[in-house]
Image: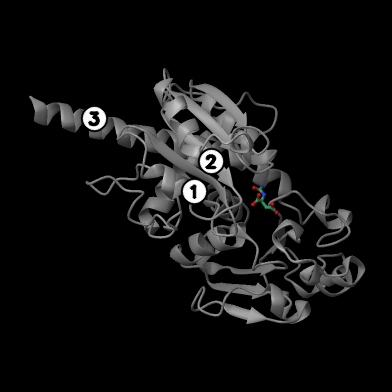
């Protein structure tokens, strides 16, 4: 299967976003527009969730070849709150195993008038591959692709940072832990750099660092205390054992001591630093419960923002496809 990061492929001939495969190539203005629209959909706890009819009559299919709780449920709620019909297929154990190719599954659902495919897979390249085979009015949204990218997570992280800390250009953000296997670190890092983050740091043991060519301009640290010194935002990451050889899996107790975000280690960051984690959290490994549930934590706010961000992405993509249809109709007379 061809691996394509999707930078150009995700746009229609007029340059509008038709799919969301990666945050690479999105401009400052495009990111800001998506974040502003997401902010419009955010409600305070206790209020009714935002709803509108942007996807009325549309059908969204969630195709998850890898487990997911937060991302899958938030895409489902986002689509429903915009008025769409939603189907959920947890496919890791069914179609591929039965030998049905992914494209057969896509074509079957497309014949049932699915307009948007939301996809998660452990192999790189599937969202772009599917995007290159669907009909022109159909969109693909990447909900997590191997260790490559997770665009909506990147957006919700940046939205959370913006809400808690203001403009990212004034901030120092430290991403800590298993970065090499993290699609979240890549998408969040990309969004932060496009938005002109003050300082971006990657803080990890050498074997879990990003590739040397990734993120020019970011700083790398091989010790936690230095890496989070003076940071406004700390993002802890799960040790992603499912993407590691047995030899790479660190000793859990040693990891907490050296790399864990704890009440002790966080003293090196700014006193009002916030802590993000994309979930699922391994409490007692990369983060302690005292931090995850304490005053520094923005974890629940991230989850809440996840629905709003996915509403913004769905509404934007579907509107772009509609505009293209209108223009095509006008040309046809
Ligand atoms: C992340 C993912 O699946 O990439 N979780 C998520 O989407 N909220 C991070 C992880 O699995 O560690």
Q: Earlier in the sequence, mark 2 or mark 3?
A: 2
Instruction: Identify which residue, 106 or 315, lies in the foreground.
Output: 106
Marks 2 and 1, how far apart in space?
Answer: 8 Å
Instruction: Indicate the position of residue 7 as horizontal and vertical percent values.
Output: 37, 57
The response on whether ligand 1 sits within 8 Å of label 3 is no
Q: Is residue 113 left or right of residue 333?
A: right
Indicate the position of residue 103 as horizontal and vertical percent values: 45, 37
Q: Position of residue 167 (x, y in %)?
A: 52, 60
Residue closer to the observer: 193 or 79:
79
Identify the mark at residue 196; answer none if there is no mark: none
Neighbor class of circle 2 (other Cα within 10 Å; few <14, some 14-19, many 20+) is: many
The residue under the point 40% across, 54% down is: 6
Label 2 belongs to which residue?
A: 119
Q: Quadrant of the C terminus?
A: top left
Q: Quadrant of residue 205?
A: bottom right
Going 45% across and 58% down the picture, which residue do you hit? 3
| Circles 2 and 1: CB atoms closer than 8 Å | yes
How are the colours assigned in the image? one colour
**Is 171 rendered above or below residue 60?**
below
Q: Is residue 214 above or below residue 291?
A: below
What residue did someone put label 1 on?
Answer: 126
The tag on residue 325 is 3
Drawn side of residue 94 relative to residue 13, left or right: right
């Amino acid at each position: 299967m061809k691996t394509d990061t999707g930078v150009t492929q995700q746009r229609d001939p007029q340059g509008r976003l038709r799919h969301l495969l990666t945050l690479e190539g999105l401009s400052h203005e495009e990111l800001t527009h998506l974040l502003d629209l997401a902010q419009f959909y955010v409600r305070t706890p206790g209020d009714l969730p935002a709803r509108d009819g942007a996807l009325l009559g549309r059908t969204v299919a969630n195709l998850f070849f890898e487990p997911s709780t937060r991302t899958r449920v938030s895409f489902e709620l986002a689509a429903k709150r915009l008025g769409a019909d939603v189907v959920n297929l947890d496919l890791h154990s069914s179609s591929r195993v039965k030998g049905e190719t992914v494209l057969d599954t896509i074509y079957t659902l497309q014949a049932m008038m699915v307009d948007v495919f939301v996809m998660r897979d452990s192999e790189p390249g599937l969202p772009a591959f599917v995007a290159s085979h669907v009909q022109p009015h159909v969109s693909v949204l990447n909900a997590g692709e191997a260790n490559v990218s997770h665009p909506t997570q990147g957006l919700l992280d940046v939205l959370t940072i913006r809400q808690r800390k203001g403009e990212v250009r004034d901030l120092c953000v430290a991403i800590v832990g298993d970065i090499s296997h993290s699609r979240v670190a890549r998408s969040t890092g990309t969004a932060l750099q496009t938005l002109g983050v003050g300082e971006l740091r990657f803080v990890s043991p050498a074997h879990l660092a990003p590739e040397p060519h990734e993120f020019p301009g970011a700083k790398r640290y091989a010790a936690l205390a230095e890496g989070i010194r003076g940071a406004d935002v700390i993002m802890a990451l799960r040790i992603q054992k499912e993407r590691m050889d047995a030899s790479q899996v660190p000793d859990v107790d040693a990891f907490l001591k050296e790399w864990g975000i704890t009440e002790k280690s966080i003293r090196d960051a700014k006193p009002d630093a916030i802590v993000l984690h994309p979930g699922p959290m391994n409490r007692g490994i990369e983060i302690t419960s005292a931090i995850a549930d304490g005053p520094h934590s923005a974890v629940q706010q991230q989850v809440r923002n996840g629905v709003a961000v996915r509403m913004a992405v769905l509404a934007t993509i579907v509107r772009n496809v509609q505009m293209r249809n209108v223009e095509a109709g006008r040309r046809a007379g």
